[in-house]
Image: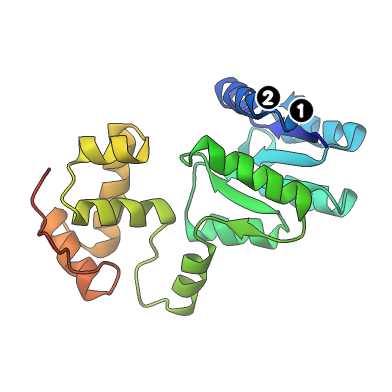
Amino acid sequence: MTIRVLLIDDHDLIRGGLRGAFERDGAFEVVDEAGDVRRGLAAALSLRPDVVVVDVNLPDGSGLDAAKRLRAELPDLGIVVLTMYDDDEHLFAALEAQASAFVAKSAPTDEVLSAARHAAAAPHAFTAADLPGAMRRRMDPTKPRLSAREQDVLELLGEGLTIPVLAKRLYISESTAKTYASKLYEKLGASNRSQALVEAVRLGLLKVPAGGTGKR
């Protein structure tokens, strides 16, 4: 059966990209779009979609608050929280809001589609790409909390990849890759790649690179 999806995001380009991805897949039908909480809630209650994909930051409120309201009003609705913030704090906030899935906007499109399928099939079972890692980090607060994407950046830096090559590998822009690297250095108390890698190895966040850390 076709999975009926409602998109709630205040960026036209994001909504357009998501609509295109869902419709190309063939298993989904985008029944409506909304750019704010008020219209999104009204559309959800009126159309009763199978899945709502909702951004965290909306002009008139929080997508996480919207998720809580949707769960209360439509108990069996699949709810995918889509956000530019892929850190543990937002992941656990989505879990507490009783969302079905948490996906970073930097994730591949296939990950969003998979999250929507999961949400339609098991709306009450929460999933996120780095949920096991987030749980481990919560259990061990002495280590820096790296997001899934920051961990990806760390591992690729450990392989010796330059920022431009790293960005292409992760399908993100160079400026976004630099931002992740900067946040990573800050969390590790490092001022450059070498210091960051040494500290990451010391903390057990990274295995000792087998081939060194030369740039490629």
The residue type indicated by label 1 comes to Glu
- Tell me if residue 94 comes above or below residue 58 in the rendering: below
- Tell me if residue 21 comes above or below residue 113 in the rendering: above
Its colouring scheme is rainbow
Between the C-alphas of marks 1 and 2, the distance is: 6 Å
Q: How many residues crowd around disc 1 within 10 Å: few (fewer than 14), some, or many (20 or more)?
A: some
The residue type indicated by label 2 comes to Glu
Residue visible at 76% across and 33% down in the picture: 6
The residue where tag 2 is placed is 23
Res. 35 image quadrant:
top right
Q: SS at mark 2?
A: helix
Could you tell me residue 21's position as x and y percent? 60, 27
Residue visible at 72% across and 33% down in the picture: 27
Q: SS at mark 1?
A: strand
Labels 1 & 2 near each other (Cβ < 8 A): yes
Could you tell me residue 5's position as x and y percent? 76, 34
Q: How many residues crowd around disc 2 within 10 Å: few (fewer than 14), some, or many (20 or more)?
A: few
Decide which of 188, 114 is in the foreground and name it: 114
Answer left or right for 70 relative to 23.
right
Answer left or right for 205 relative to 210.
right
Residue visible at 26% across and 66% down in the picture: 206
Could you tell me residue 18's position as x and y percent? 61, 28
User: Can the viewer see residue 144?
Assistant: yes
Quadrant where the N terminus sits is top right
User: Can the viewer see residue 65?
Assistant: no
The first of marks 1 and 2 along the sequence is 2
The residue where tag 1 is placed is 29
Answer left or right for 156 relative to 12.
left
